[in-house]
Image (spheres, helix red, strand yellow):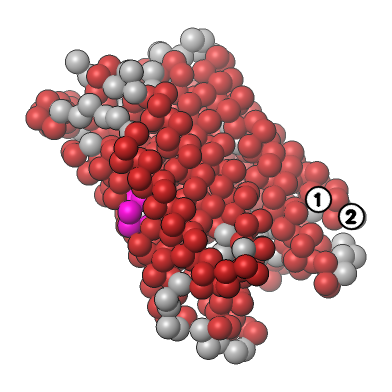
Amino acid sequence: MSYADRNLLYWRRNLAVCVFGSFTTLVSLSMLLPFLPLYVQQLGVTSQAAVVQWSAVAFGATFFGTALTAPIWGRLADRYGRKPMLVRAAIGMAVVMSMIGLARDVTDLVVLRLIAGLIGGYASASIVMIGSQVPKEKAGWALGVLSTGALSGNLIGPLVGGFLPEFVGIRGTFFVGGAMIAVAAITTILLIREDFDRASDGARRHRGARIERGSSRWPVIAALLSTAMMVLLANMSIEPIITVYIGHLGVALDDQARIAGVIMACSALGSILTAARLGALADRVGSWNVIIGCLLLTGAVMVPQAFVTQWWQLAILRGLMGMTIAGLLPAIAKLIRHSVEEHNTGKVLGYLQSAQFSGQVIGPLIGGQVGAHFGLHPVFLVTGALLVFCAGINGWVKYRFQSEVLKFTKNDHQIHN
């Protein structure tokens, strides 16, 4: 009996726990955004330019660490089970988050944020577990629901971080975050169920390694991983310039931070509204169609963002972009779930997480460089062009490797070519 069949009774309960854990851990990780520069100043950095630089490094360190280790944790999940990876991530993040509140200087802050990425990744481990256990015909919907939990955490986190330091102080906020993740760890230990047969699954993994060597499916997987990176790259590309951009739209200096937060939240809110629906749509009409369609729509919505005249227009367009981009990651994860043998699911989904976090690191860098050298408007145009180009690449891959694509989608209810 396969791993998915043995865990058929558990996946709905596990999905609920993973949604809660992903939400909780991402609230804790993202709530430092509003006060991160203030904490950097508390740690002894005085120059404004240095505060901005160190804040960016500290923020990106976690994503960089996760990008490095996600494939490793995915391999270990294939070898030792998915639940141990969830427990490891939750306990590790709870400890490190609390230690950030004890940082002595900015170097401690950066190192601890990096360690949080290296040993953490609860949301990534959740995708590996649910992607491995859920029936293939429900994979799009389930991964969409899981994505909604993660997106909600990223949306609520900065809102919590905006008021919590007033009550417990900046350092105390990290202890509260650590306690929240500890609750997720306890919930995971007590409620997650997994039937993992190390001897059986390990034997299957070794047999499958010989079968898959040289398979032509890897170009298709590479295209999917590149697309996943592009999704986060596009979503994060304007992060470094958004405050400056709304200043050019006439927003007063005192209101820029608040308005920037609203605009960023609109993208996450749009994604929350449509992630599960688009995931279910991928189950019905085929994941490739959802991927290509969402890339084209997102690229199209990017273009008018370069020509807005009021901040609320940008907020509406970012919300629409969040709605169109939300279907991409669940559809990609579903295709990858179909593309590899069960014994390699964790490893390849780990590569998917690595690709996503790479985009989260690269996106702000590209946006900042384009904005600095060519102006603010081209950031949106370049990002939109990259998304349309990516849609073309996916269309070509679907046509060029049609036989492999058909294998990937044979478990969908409908296949459209």
How many C-alpha atoms fall within 10 Å of the one at disc 2: few (<14), some, or many (≥20)? few
> Of helix, strand and loop, which one carries label 2?
loop
Q: Nearer the viewer, residue 354 or 5?
A: 5
Q: Quadrant of the N terminus?
A: top left
Q: Residue sitting at 75 percent across and 66 percent down? A: 257
Q: Which residue is mark 1?
A: 314
Q: Amino acid at mark 1?
A: Leu
Q: Is residue 347 magenta?
A: no
User: Is there any visible trace of residue 385 in the rendered image?
Assistant: no
Q: Magenta part of the protein: which range?
A: 89-93
Q: Residue sitting at 87 percent across and 69 percent down? A: 252
> Of helix, strand and loop, which one carries label 1?
helix
Question: Alpha-carbon distance for marks 2 and 1?
Answer: 7 Å
Q: Position of residue 363 (x, y in %)?
A: 57, 57
Q: Residue sitting at 85 percent across and 48 percent down? A: 313
- Residue furthest to the front in view is 167
Based on the displayed image, in which of its 4 quarters is residue 215 positioned?
top left
Based on the displayed image, in which of its 4 quarters is residue 76 positioned?
top left
Q: Amino acid at mark 2?
A: Gln
Q: Is residue 230 left or right of residue 377?
A: left
Looking at the picture, does residue 320 appear above or below residue 93?
above
Q: Which residue is mark 2?
A: 310
Q: Residue sitting at 52 percent across and 24 percent down? A: 141
Magenta region, mostly helix, strand or loop?
helix
Q: Nearer the viewer, residue 43 or 63?
A: 43
User: Is there any visible trace of residue 72 in the rendered image?
Assistant: yes
Q: Position of residue 56 (x, y in %)?
A: 55, 70
Q: Is residue 55 left or right of residue 87?
A: right
Q: Are marks 2 and 1 in contact (CB under 8 Å)?
A: yes
How many C-alpha atoms fall within 10 Å of the one at disc 1: few (<14), some, or many (≥20)? many
